C-alpha cells in the first residue's frame, strides 16, 4: 500500500495538520516507508481470533453515581490561551 | 555519594551521615556542571528541590521518614507536576504548567523523595533516541556523539551520568528499557495497570506504563514499592493488595527455568550484544538455572502491529491539542479550523505528525478492519505466545536491543530504521507483561549492552530478584562513564 500526495493531503486535513509544500515529498516518502513496514501483518490469517483491545482484557470499573469532584473551572482555565468570563474563546463559528 | 545506590543513600540518611539538603546540593551541582553538554534535563528548579529537601530533613528529625525520604529523583517531563512546567518534549506544551500532580509524583512526594527536575524526552514519548525533543537531543554519557536511546533518554542519562540517583520513565514500546540498555542503567516496565497513568501525558493508552530507572535492580524494587498502587482516577489501574517488590531479592537461581526465544537471536542482532547476553546466560546456567529454548512465533509481527496500534491511539489522544484549553495556540488564524490546523502544525514536530497521520490512516473509513482490527487480533496471538512460553519457563531472557548506542543523527532520516531498535522491547507491552533491562557488559566500542528479562503478569518481585542476584556477582551496573568522572 502506497499513499499518493492527494491521499496524504486528505489525511492531514482529517488530522487538522498542514503539510508544507516544501516538505511534502519527504513526508510522503517516509510515511510510505512506515506503511510498507506495517503491510507485513496484513497477509496473516487471523480468522477466528478475538481482537485484543487491552492488555489483561480489562473490564471497565463502575463507581457509584455520586459527585466526587468540586468546581475547578478557575484553576483549569488559568492555563488556557484565551478565556473571558469563565468561557474559552474561539473564533466565531456561527454567523 | 554520587555513585551510591538509593538503598545506600537511604541508609546514609537514616544514620544521619548525610542530610537531604546536602544530597540535593551535591546532585544539583553535578547537574549544573554536566547538563550543558548532555541536555538530560529540560527544567531544573533548585529552590524547589532545596525546599523539598528541608522538608525531608524535618520529617527525619521528627522520626517520620521512610526509605525514600530525602532521596533526590529526576522525573521524566511526561509526568504532570503542579507548579513546574511539563513540556513532554514538545513545543505544544512548552509553557504548560499542570494544575495538578500525576499520581506517581504524588506518591513519590508523599514518600518524601525530592524532585531534582524534569528530564528531556522524545516528543510525546515518540522516538527511540531522544532526538525528537523540541528541546534538542540528549547525549549519551558513554559517548556524547551517540544517542542515549529513548524516549526516556533524559532520565536514563541523568542516572548514567550520576546527576540523579534514580529517575522515573514511561514505556510504551520500550521507552524505559531501551534507553536503560543504551546507557548502562536499569529500567523496569511494570505489568500494565500496576502504576497509575493519572497525570502521565497520554501517548498510546492501552500500552503506556510508568516505571523506574536506577543503577540497581534492588533500587528499582524500592522505587516500585512507592510508585505502584491502585488509583481510582485511572480506569485501567489494577486493584491489588500492595506487595513488597524487594521480597524476592534473595531468590535461589537453582532450578530457575530461563526461556530463550530463538526469535530474539536472529539476523540483525549485533555480534557483541549476542556474545554479552550469552555470557550472562552462561553465568545463570552456572548458578543452577536451566535454559529452555522457547518460541515466540508471532514476535516478528510485533513491530508492524505496534506501529498500527500505537499511532492509532496516539492520533486519538493527541486530538486534544487544539489550542483552546491549554498548550500552544497559533497567533494568526482565519477561523476555528484554521486555528486548530495552525496550532497543531506549529506545535508538533515531524515524528509526532507522522504518527498522527499513520494513526489517522489506519482508523479511517474503509481501512479499519484491514489495519486496526487485524493488529488487535495479532496482538492476541502475540500475547498467547507468551502464555504458552510461560508454561515452560519462569523468566524469558534475551537482548534488550539489537545493537548498542548509535551515532546522533544516523537514523533520523529513516523512521523504519529507528523503529527497528525496539523489536525486542515491543512484544512485552503488547501483551501487558512486565520486563526490565540490566547492564550485562560492553561492546568493542565500550558502549553498554542490556540484558532483558520478561516475566509473567505481576511477577515483578521475581524478575527483580533474578536481576539482583546477577548484580551481586557483576559490576557492570556500577561502572561510571569515563567522560563524566565522579
Image: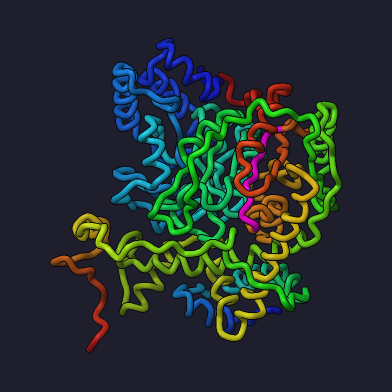
The reply to whether the magenta stretch includes residue B438 is yes
In the picture shown, does residue B419 fall above or below B13?
Answer: below
In the picture shown, does residue B421 fall above or below B32?
Answer: below
Q: Position of residue A62 (x, y in %)?
A: 40, 63
In the image, farthest residue toward the left: A85
Residue under the image location 59 percent in, 45 percent down: B189
Q: Quadrant of the C terminus of chain B?
A: top right
The reply to whether residue B367 is visible in this rendering is yes
The reply to whether the magenta stretch includes residue B420 is no
Q: Position of residue B320 (x, y in %)?
A: 39, 67
> Closer to the camera, A8 or A57?
A57
**Start-end of magenta stretch:** B431-439
Q: Position of residue A8 (x, y in %)?
A: 57, 78
Q: Position of residue B111 (x, y in %)?
A: 39, 32
In the picture shown, does residue B290 fall above or below A48?
Answer: above
Residue under the image location 81 percent in, 29 percent down: B283
> Closer to the camera, B291 or B29?
B291
The reply to whether residue B482 is visible in this rendering is no
> Taking B207 as reference, is B466 left or right?
right
In the picture shown, does residue A63 fall above or below B257?
Answer: below
When asked about the image quadrant of residue B484, the answer is: top right
> Taking B285 as reference, is B341 left or right?
left
Please say which color scheme the image uses. Answer: rainbow
> Closer to the camera, B344 or B237?
B237
> Closer to the camera, B433 or A34?
B433
Q: How many marks?
A: 0
When asked about the image quadrant of residue A22, the answer is: bottom right
Amino acid at each position: 500500500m502506497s499513499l499518493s500526495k492527494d491521499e496524504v493531503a486528505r489525511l492531514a486535513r482529517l488530522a487538522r495538520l498542514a503539510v508544507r509544500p516544501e516538505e511534502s515529498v519527504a513526508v510522503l516518502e517516509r510515511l510510505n516507508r512506515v506503511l510498507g513496514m506495517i503491510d507485513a501483518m496484513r497477509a496473516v490469517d487471523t480468522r477466528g481470533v478475538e481482537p485484543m483491545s487491552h492488555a489483561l482484557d480489562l473490564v471497565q470499573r463502575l463507581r457509584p453515581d455520586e459527585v466526587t469532584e468540586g468546581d475547578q473551572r478557575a484553576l483549569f482555565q488559568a492555563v488556557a490561551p484565551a478565556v473571558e468570563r469563565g468561557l474559552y474563546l474561539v473564533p466565531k463559528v456561527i454567523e | 555519594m554520587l555513585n551510591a545506590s538509593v538503598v545506600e543513600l537511604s541508609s546514609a540518611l537514616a544514620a544521619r551521615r548525610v542530610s537531604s539538603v546536602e544530597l540535593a546540593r551535591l546532585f544539583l551541582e553535578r547537574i549544573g556542571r554536566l547538563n550543558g553538554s548532555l541536555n538530560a534535563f529540560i527544567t531544573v528548579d533548585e529552590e524547589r528541590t532545596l525546599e523539598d529537601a528541608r522538608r525531608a530533613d524535618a520529617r527525619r528529625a521528627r522520626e517520620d521518614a521512610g526509605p525514600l525520604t530525602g532521596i533526590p529523583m529526576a522525573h521524566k517531563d511526561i509526568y504532570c507536576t503542579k507548579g513546574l512546567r511539563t513540556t513532554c518534549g514538545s513545543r505544544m506544551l512548552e509553557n504548560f504548567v499542570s494544575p495538578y500532580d500525576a499520581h506517581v509524583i504524588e506518591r513519590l512526594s508523599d514518600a518524601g523523595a525530592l524532585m531534582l527536575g524534569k528530564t528531556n524526552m522524545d516528543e510525546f514519548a515518540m522516538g527511540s533516541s531522544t532526538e525528537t525533543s523540541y528541546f534538542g537531543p540528549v547525549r549519551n554519557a558513554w559517548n556524547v556523539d551517540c544517542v542515549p536511546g529513548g524516549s526516556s533518554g533524559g532520565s536514563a542519562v541523568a542516572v548514567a551520568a550520576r546527576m540523579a540517583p534514580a529517575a522515573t520513565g514511561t514505556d510504551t514500546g520500550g521507552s524505559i528499557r531501551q534507553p536503560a540498555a543504551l546507557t548502562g542503567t536499569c529500567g523496569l516496565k511494570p505489568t500494565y495497570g500496576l502504576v497509575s497513568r493519572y497525570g502521565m501525558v497520554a501517548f498510546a493508552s492501552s500500552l503506556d506504563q510508568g516505571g523506574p530507572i536506577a543503577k540497581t535492580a534492588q533500587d528499582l524494587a524500592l522505587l516500585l514499592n512507592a510508585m505502584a498502587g491502585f488509583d481510582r482516577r485511572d480506569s485501567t489501574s489494577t486493584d491489588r493488595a500492595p506487595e513488597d517488590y524487594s521480597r524476592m531479592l534473595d531468590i535461589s537461581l537453582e532450578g530457575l527455568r530461563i526461556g530463550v526465544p530463538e526469535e530474539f537471536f536472529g539476523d540483525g542482532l549485533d555480534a557483541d550484544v549476542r556474545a554479552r547476553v550469552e555470557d550472562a546466560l552462561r553465568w545463570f546456567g552456572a548458578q543452577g538455572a536451566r535454559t529452555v529454548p522457547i518460541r515466540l512465533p508471532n514476535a516478528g509481527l510485533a513491530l508492524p502491529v505496534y506501529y498500527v496500534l500505537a499511532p492509532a491511539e496516539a492520533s486519538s489522544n493527541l486530538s486534544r491539542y487544539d489550542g483552546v484549553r491549554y498548550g500552544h495556540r497559533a497567533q494568526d488564524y482565519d477561523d476555528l479550523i484554521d486555528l486548530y490546523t495552525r496550532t497543531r502544525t506549529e506545535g508538533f514536530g515531524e515524528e509526532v505528525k507522522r504518527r498522527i497521520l499513520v494513526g489517522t490512516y489506519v482508523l479511517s473509513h474503509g481501512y479499519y478492519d484491514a489495519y486496526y482490527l487485524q493488529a488487535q487480533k495479532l496482538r492476541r496471538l502475540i500475547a498467547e505466545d507468551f502464555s504458552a512460553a510461560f508454561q515452560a519457563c519462569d523468566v524469558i531472557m534475551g537482548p534488550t536491543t539489537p545493537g548498542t548506542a548509535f551515532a546522533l543523527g544516523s537514523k533520523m532520516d529513516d523512521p523504519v530504521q529507528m523503529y527497528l531498535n525496539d523489536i525486542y522491547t515491543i512484544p512485552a507491552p503488547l501483551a501487558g507483561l512486565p520486563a526490565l533491562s540490566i547492564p550485562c557488559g560492553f561492546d568493542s566500542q565500550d558502549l553498554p549492552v542490556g540484558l532483558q528479562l520478561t516475566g509473567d503478569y505481576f511477577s515483578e518481585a521475581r524478575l527483580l530478584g533474578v536481576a539482583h542476584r546477577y548484580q551481586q556477582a557483576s559490576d557492570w551496573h556500577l561502572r561510571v562513564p569515563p567522560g563524566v568522572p565522579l
